[in-house]
Image: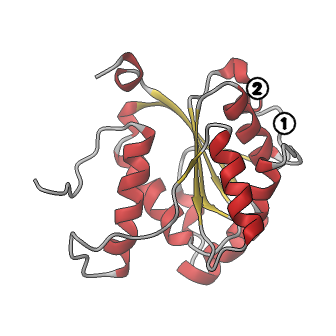
Amino acid sequence: MNSMENKKRKIVIAITGASGAIYAKLLLEKLEKLENQCEAIGLIMSDNAKFVWESEIGDRSYEKFTFSNYSKNDFMAPFASGSAKYDTMVIVPCSMGTLGRIASGISNDLTTRAADVILKERRKLILVARETPLNTIHLKNMLAVSEAGGIICPAVPSYYSNPSSIDEAAMTVVDRIVDLIGLENSSYRWGE
């Protein structure tokens, strides 16, 4: 393991209003279990994210997570500056509007500002894109973010582990996100 994998992570999780609240919920639950590998976890939720969560999951369980919560316009949040040394940001699910603003360098809220900081500091930005089908603008924006150093991790479940529920299928994406973050995680591994 390199030194980056041995150190405790400082992670920003942003949840946008794209469909796919299940991915955010499962990731937050997984991070609770792996919190001993993290120095800090900051959470940003848009108003639309809360609405979608309540529509898709049927509750307000996003309120139960004890991570540090920041409002969408809190530019005093530590990760609004590179000096706070947050090393990873995950936007899950990532709307195409958020992706487009990041690709264009528009920092009009805390999510896009934090993403801009992560990219400018050459740290790890993971966008869990949730849209289908994709138009040319979406694809060009994904390419721009990828060329800037971001990771596009589409919310596309895998099936070789034979998931038997929606949660298990969604967890295949979440486990991939956790791997990309660099946290030690017990999950299905091909060929093992």
In terms of image quadrants, where is residue 26? bottom left
- Evaluate whether residue 71 shows in this view: no
In the rendered structure, the answer to whether residue 142 lies left or right of residue 26 reads right
Instruction: Determine whether 103 is above or below 23 in the image.
Output: above
* Residue 143 picture location, percent across and down: 67, 52
Instruction: Determine whether 102 is above or below 161 in the image.
Output: above
Q: Give me the residue at 84% from left, 48% from top.
A: 104
* Residue 20 picture location, percent across and down: 56, 72
Q: Give me the residue at 56% from left, 44% from top.
A: 67
In the rendered structure, the answer to whether residue 44 lies left or right of residue 157 reads right
State the CA–CA distance, disc 2 to disc 1: 9 Å
Choose the circle earlier in sequence order: 2 or 1: 1
Task: Judge the density around disc 2: few (<14), some (14-19), many (≥20) Cα neighbours within 10 Å.
Answer: some
Task: Kindly identify which residue carries mark 2.
Answer: 81
Which of these two is toward me, 140 or 160? 140
Q: Give me the residue at 56% from left, 29% from top.
A: 87
* Residue 120 picture location, percent across and down: 73, 28
Structure colour scheme: secondary structure
The kind of residue tagged 1 is Phe
The kind of residue tagged 2 is Ser
- The dot on residue 75 is 1
